[in-house]
């Protein structure tokens, strides 16, 4: 059995460093550290990895002053779902409208990967566009359909 990858993206309401998004920015390291210690966590894009062409958030999503994206891999959908919805991370999801623009389409995607595969934001964007255009499938899904897709 393989693993899963997830990518989420969004546009901040204000540029990086603006005090109106401090509640998000001041807690990002804490939430990322929690992910790193969570059951089933394997890897996440960070640091210099964002400098690679295939992971350039601004080039992929436009508006580099406010575009953000995360990318990580997990042993299972259940492990990722637990981190997102059953830890302090859920409190930040509940507050996302304070910091991020609302969009009327999916802003995250989950998809299966082979063990050991390290995805890129380019791959994640392709999966997100697939989810947006074709709806959930075993190759690109969301939390609403994740339990059945990952079984």
Image (cartoon, rainbow, N blue to C red):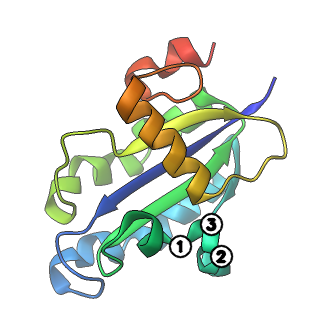
| Label 3: element kind | helix
Circles 3 and 1, Cβ within 8 Å, touching? The answer is: yes
Circles 2 and 3, Cβ within 8 Å, touching? The answer is: yes
Q: Describe residue 110's horizontal placement relative to residue 104 as left or right.
A: right
x and y, in percent, of residue 105 in the image: 26, 39
| Quarter of the view holding residue 85 | top left
Q: Describe residue 73's horizontal placement relative to residue 22 as left or right.
A: right
**Residue that appears at 43% across and 18% down:** 145
Q: Nearer the viewer, residue 148 or 37?
A: 148
The CA span between labels 3 and 1 is 6 Å
User: Residue beneath label 3, please?
Assistant: 54
The disc label shown at residue 82, or none = none
Can residue 149 be seen in this snapshot? Answer: yes
| Above or below for 28 versus 81 | below
x and y, in percent, of residue 83 in the image: 51, 42
| Label 2: element kind | loop
Q: Describe residue 38's horizontal placement relative to residue 105 as left or right.
A: right
| Above or below for 144 versus 73 | above
Q: Describe residue 79's horizontal placement relative to residue 129 as left or right.
A: right
Q: Residues within 10 Å of mark 2 (few under 14, many from 20)?
A: few
Q: Residues within 10 Å of mark 1 (few under 14, many from 20)?
A: some
User: Residue beneath label 2, please?
Assistant: 52
x and y, in percent, of residue 103 in the image: 20, 48
User: Residue beneath label 1, please?
Assistant: 56
């Amino acid at each position: 059995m393989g693993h899963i990858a997830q990518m989420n993206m969004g546009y901040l309401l204000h540029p990086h460093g603006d005090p109106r998004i401090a509640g998000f920015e001041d807690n990002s390291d804490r939430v990322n550290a929690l992910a790193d210690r969570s059951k089933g966590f394997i890897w996440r894009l960070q640091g210099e990895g964002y400098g690679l062409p295939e992971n350039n958030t601004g080039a992929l999503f436009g508006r580099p002053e406010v575009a953000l994206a995360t990318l990580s891999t997990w042993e299972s959908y259940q492990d990722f779902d637990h981190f997102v919805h059953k830890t302090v991370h859920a409190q930040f999801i509940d507050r996302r409208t304070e910091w991020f623009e609302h969009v009327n389409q999916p802003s995250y995607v989950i998809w299966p990967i082979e063990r050991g595969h390290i995805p890129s934001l380019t791959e994640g964007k392709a999966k997100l566009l697939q989810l947006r255009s074709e709806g959930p499938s075993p190759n690109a899904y969301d939390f609403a359909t994740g339990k059945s897709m990952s079984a």
